[in-house]
């Protein structure tokens, strides 16, 4: 059974960078059927797609966040990572890592991590 | 850019009742890229419906999706206690890949 697990600091200071890692177990990153993404949810609010990455390293970002986002992948560690620069309080959210399916259940986030709350505060 | 609107914002119903949730797109979208999720408090969203009307694995048949163009519907035929949650619709843009979510509908116990 595929499992995803987010890790990283729960508290980040304003203007600094937020960095999270997603470790995948029970499967491989190396399939063109999927890409691997990040979705966030501010407390009490809705879902926002941040971006995604193929195992080849090709990335796609939400245009509204593109200037601040970098997603990378390490296939040897079966991990992918998120870096969001110049954070503000508006970036406080639960961050989920997900598998994004582009073939069988097209356009779905069919596996999710449990999510990790990142608070931006001094 | 496509915007998804969901209605109502909150739906207050009793167990056993039928729930009808709507999702509207600001422009016509391919139905095979319209998706629904269920989210319970403190949990990650769960995939319910893909391709507007296909149930994901393990989803009870009381959940059904329908619609095309700009109007889509998620129906829960008879609400069970575990169905009280927030439901999000999502559109997938394939080129380039893009995921857009609606604001959600909360189904609460009346």
Image: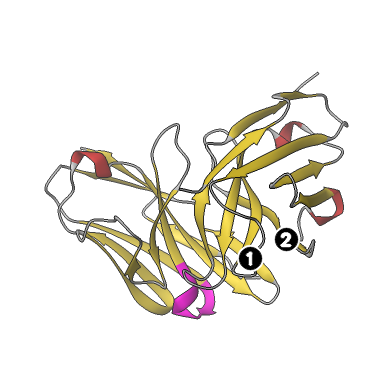
Q: Residue B38: which disc?
A: none
Regarding mark 2 in the picture, which secondary structure is present there?
Answer: loop
Left or right of residue A58: residue A6: left
Label ID, residue A55: 2
Q: Chain of mark 1?
A: A
Q: Are marks 1 and 2 in contact (CB under 8 Å)?
A: yes
Give left or right: position of B77 versus A17: left
Q: Which residue is mark 1?
A: A31
Q: Which residues are magenta?
A: B26-34
Q: Mark 1 to mark 2: distance in Å?
A: 7 Å
Picture residue at 19% right of the left edge, 58% below the top: B62
Q: Residue at x 74, y 52 (%)?
A: A75
Q: State the residue lying farthest toward the left.
A: B16
Q: Residues within 10 Å of mark 2 (few under 14, many from 20)?
A: many
Q: Is residue A102 left or right of residue B22?
A: right
Q: Residue at the top extreme?
A: A122
Q: Residue B82's x, y, as percent?
A: 25, 40
Q: 10 Å neighbourhood of mark 1: few (<14), some, or many (≥20)?
A: few
Please determine if labels 1 and 2 lie on a single subunit. yes
Q: How far across and how far down the image is residue B14, in percent?
A: 16, 42
For the C terminus of chain B, the image quarter is top left
Residue visible at 85% across and 35% down in the picture: A17
Within the image, what quadrant is residue A24 found in? top right
Q: Is B13 drawn above or below residue B96 in the view shown? A: above
- Residue A121 or A35: which is nearer the viewer? A35
Asked which quadrant contains residue B75, the reply is bottom left
Relative to residue A71, is residue A96 depicted above or below?
A: above
């Amino acid at each position: 059974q595929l499992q995803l697990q987010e890790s990283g600091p729960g508290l980040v200071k304003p203007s600094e960078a937020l960095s999270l890692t997603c470790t995948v177990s029970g499967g491989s990153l190396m399939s063109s059927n999927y890409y691997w993404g990040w979705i966030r949810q501010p407390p009490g609010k809705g879902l926002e797609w941040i971006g995604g990455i193929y195992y080849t390293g090709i990335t796609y970002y939400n245009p509204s966040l593109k200037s601040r986002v970098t997603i990378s992948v390490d296939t040897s560690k079966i991990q992918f990572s998120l870096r969001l620069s110049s954070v503000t309080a508006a970036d406080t959210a639960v961050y989920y890592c997900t598998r994004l399916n582009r073939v069988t259940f097209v356009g779905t986030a069919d596996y999710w991590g449990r999510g990790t709350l990142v608070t931006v505060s001094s | 850019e496509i915007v998804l609107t969901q209605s109502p914002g909150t739906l207050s119903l009793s167990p056993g009742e039928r729930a009808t949730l709507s999702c509207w797109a600001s422009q016509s979208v391919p139905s095979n890229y319209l998706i629904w999720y269920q989210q319970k408090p403190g949990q990650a969203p769960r995939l319910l419906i893909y391709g507007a009307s296909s149930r994901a694995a393990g989803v009870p048949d009381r959940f059904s999706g329908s619609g095309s163009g700009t109007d889509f519907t998620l129906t829960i035929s008879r609400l069970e206690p575990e169905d009280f949650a927030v439901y999000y619709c999502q559109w997938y843009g394939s080129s380039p890949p893009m995921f857009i979510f609606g604001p959600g509908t909360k189904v609460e116990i009346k």
